[in-house]
Image: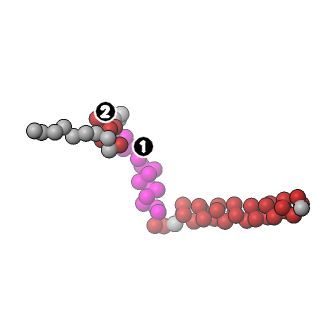
Amino acid sequence: MYQILSSFAQTWGLLSFIFMFAAVLAYALWPKNKGKFAQAAAMPLHDEGPLTEDAQLETQGLRQEPSHG
């Protein structure tokens, strides 16, 4: 019984990892995603320095606008 389960797991595990690798590779090399990856690669070059506490809260959506009245 162990031998059967072991060979099943080894065979189908290998095939599933090959399929996942091919899917990730296809996603990474798909022409439609080129712009997205180019933008992500250039992100560190457009660093504007450390954020202030208000800017950090604003990016997280936690900043409360002051009430006027």
Reading the chain from its start, which is encountered first: label 1 or label 2? 1
Mark 1–mark 2 Cα distance, whole angstroms, equals: 18 Å
Q: Say what secondary structure mark 2 lies in.
A: loop
**Outermost residue to the left:** 69
Q: Nearer the viewer, residue 53 or 25?
A: 53
67, 55: nearer the viewer: 67
Locate residue 26 relative to residue 43 in the image: left or right: right
Residue located at (32% from left, 41% from top):
62
Q: Which mark is residue 54?
A: none
Q: Quadrant of residue 44?
A: top left
Residue 11 point in image, percent of width and height? 79, 64
> Crowding at label 2, few (<14), some or many (≥20) Cα neighbours within 10 Å?
few
Helix or strand or loop: what does disc 1 sit on? helix
Image quarter where the N terminus lies is bottom right
Q: Main secondary structure of the magenta part?
A: helix
Q: Position of residue 7 (x, y in %)?
A: 84, 62
Three-letter code for the amino acid on which mark 1 is drawn: Pro
- Residue at which label 1 appears: 44
Give the x, y percent position of residue 41. 45, 50
Horizontally, residue 39 falls left or right of residue 25, namely left
| Point 57% across, 65% down: residue | 26
Location of mark 2 (residue): 52
Task: Please say whether residue 12 is one of the residues in the magenta stretch.
Answer: no
Q: Which residue occupies 37% across, 40% down?
A: 47
Tag nearer the camera, 1 or 2: 2
Neighbours of disc 1 within 10 Å: few (<14), some (14-19), many (20+): few
Residue interval drawn in magenta: 33-47
Asked whether, in this view, residue 38 is left or right of residue 18, the answer is: left
**Residue type beneath disc 2:** Thr
Q: Would you identify the image quadrant in which residue 64 lies?
A: top left
